[in-house]
Structure formats: C-alpha cells, structure tokens
Image (cartoon, rainbow, N blue to C red):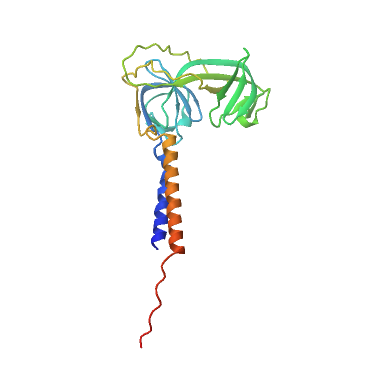
C-alpha cells in the first residue's frame, strides 16, 4: 500500500505544478476617484480620470460597483456615469493614447477575437473586438464570426498602450486624448508601446498583487518537467522492486 500512497502524493504534486500559473496569476488593484465612464462594451470599460488621463480596463463580470447605493455590474455601466472604486483586475489598466472614428472600414479578415480592417486611408490594421459585441451591418446585428470579407462597418477605435506606472514624480508629457461620442462598433488597438512617462496621481493608484513575474513560464515548465522525471524514476523503481522482490521462504511445518 506504500506505493499507492507514493503515487497519490506524486499526482498531487504534479497537479499543483500544472495549476501553478493560475495560482500565481497577477492581481492588480486600481483605485479611481470620480472617474467618468467614457465607453463600455462587454468587459471593456474606458474611464476618464480626474487628471485627464483616459484608461482602458478589462473588468470581470463578477466585480460589482456601488453607484447611488446600488450594486452595478460592468455590463450595466453606461457612458456618463461617475464612479469611485478600487477595481481588481488580472492585468494593469492600459493608457489610452488616441480615440478616432473610422467612418467606413472594410473587413479583410477575422482571427479569433481580432478583426483585420482596411481603413479609408488605405491602412490595414488588426483590432481587438470586445467579447460579445454586436456589429451592425446594413441595419442587422451580427456576431464577429458572422462577418464576411468586404463588409463595411463604422467603428470607434481606442488606441492603448501598457501603462508602466511606478509612482515616480516625473514630468507629465502624455497629452490626454479627446473622447468623441462613440459611433458604431468599439475596437481596441493595442499596438502602441509601453510608457513610463506618467506619474500616478494622488487619488488614482495602481497596486500590483501577487505576480507571476518571479516564476516565469520557463520556470514553471522546468518545475513540471522535474516532477515528471521524478515520477518516472519512482514508477521505474517500484516496477523493478515488484519484479525482483524478495519472496518469503516457505513455512516449515511443525511436527
């Protein structure tokens, strides 16, 4: 029975290793005060902060805001609402550099949750479509996977970049973007590079939680490989022991 207990222990260790990425996933707390909701679609929310910055958040459905004494989900938010909250997300919010309206874009290709669009100025660009968003084509609502090459759409494009805020007192060189009223489908352009040129305002803070940075993907893979190797060695040892095990001598009958 000892080998069965050993196998169960080994299996538990391997399961922990496989679940490690989820257990070590990053959690980020962002405190916002009197932030205005600019755009919202699915789990994507774009907020304008009191210092003028505009940031894009991806907020889980389980999160609840308290507005006018009522619990409100992310999908119940509407542009124009003002909220104060400590928002917990799996990744830091992204800084919005620019918002522009594409009057007539031509669908080129679809890749997963991404849409490759050709703009009127001849630019081909890949955009992210918020989950569950409905796209209006000739007055009819369609899902992303129902679009076809050549379809014409109108879109509001939000260009973002990673906001690597450290809280350092540095000069504010980022120019907050204009936020025109949304027209058509909301598309997210995540092609911009990270920035470190913004200080965190006194009433908006970003606090990283447990991050997977210490344990990178290569470390996790190495851990899993080591555990698998140990398991193989233990299994081999038990098989050899079973095959070459010492048998007990026959009992001597008593006269």
Residue 21 appears anywhere in the view = no
Name the residue at 39% across, 19% down: 49
Residue 218 locus on image (x, y percent): 44, 35
Answer left or right for 100 relative to 200.
Answer: right
Q: Nearer the viewer, residue 215 or 115?
A: 215
The image quadrant of residue 63 is top left
Q: Is residue 244 above or below residue 74?
A: below
Residue 222 appears anywhere in the view = yes
Q: Is residue 99 above or below residue 112?
A: above
Residue 170 locus on image (x, y percent): 33, 14
Quarter holding the C terminus? Answer: bottom left
Residue 60 locus on image (x, y percent): 45, 34
Name the residue at 56% across, 15% down: 101
Q: Nearer the viewer, residue 99 or 171?
A: 171
Q: Nearer the viewer, residue 191 or 88?
A: 191
Residue 158 locus on image (x, y percent): 51, 19
Answer left or right for 247 relative to 107.
Answer: left
Quarter holding the N terminus? Answer: bottom left
Number of marks in picture: 0
Q: Is residue 61 above or below residue 49?
A: below
Q: Nearer the viewer, residue 249 or 99?
A: 249
The image quadrant of residue 57 is top left
| View extreme (bottom): residue | 255
Q: Is residue 147 above or below residue 54?
A: below
């Amino acid at each position: 029975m000892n080998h069965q207990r050993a196998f169960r222990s080994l299996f538990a260790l391997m399961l922990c290793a496989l679940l490690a990425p989820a257990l070590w996933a990053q959690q980020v707390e962002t405190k916002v005060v009197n932030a205005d909701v600019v755009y919202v679609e699915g789990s994507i929310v774009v907020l304008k902060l009191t210092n003028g910055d505009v940031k894009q958040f991806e907020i889980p459905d389980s999160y609840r805001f308290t507005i006018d004494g009522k619990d409100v989900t992310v999908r119940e938010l509407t542009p124009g609402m003002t909220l104060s909250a400590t928002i917990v997300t799996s990744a830091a919010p992204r800084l919005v550099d620019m918002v522009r309206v594409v009057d007539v874009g031509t669908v080129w290709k679809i890749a997963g949750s991404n849409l490759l669009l050709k703009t009127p100025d001849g630019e081909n660009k890949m955009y992210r479509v918020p989950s569950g968003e409905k796209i209006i084509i000739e007055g009819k609502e369609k899902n992303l996977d129902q679009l076809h090459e050549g379809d014409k759409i109108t879109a509001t494009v939000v260009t973002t970049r990673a906001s690597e805020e450290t809280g350092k007192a540095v000069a504010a060189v980022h120019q907050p973007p204009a936020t025109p009223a949304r027209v058509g489908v909301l598309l997210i352009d995540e092609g911009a590079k990270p920035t470190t040129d913004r200080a965190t305002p006194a009433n908006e803070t970003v606090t990283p939680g447990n991050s997977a940075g210490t344990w990178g993907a290569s470390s996790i893979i190495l851990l899993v490989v080591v555990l698998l190797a140990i398991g193989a060695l233990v299994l081999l040892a038990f098989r050899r022991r079973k095959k070459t095990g010492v048998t007990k001598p026959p009992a001597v009958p008593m006269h």
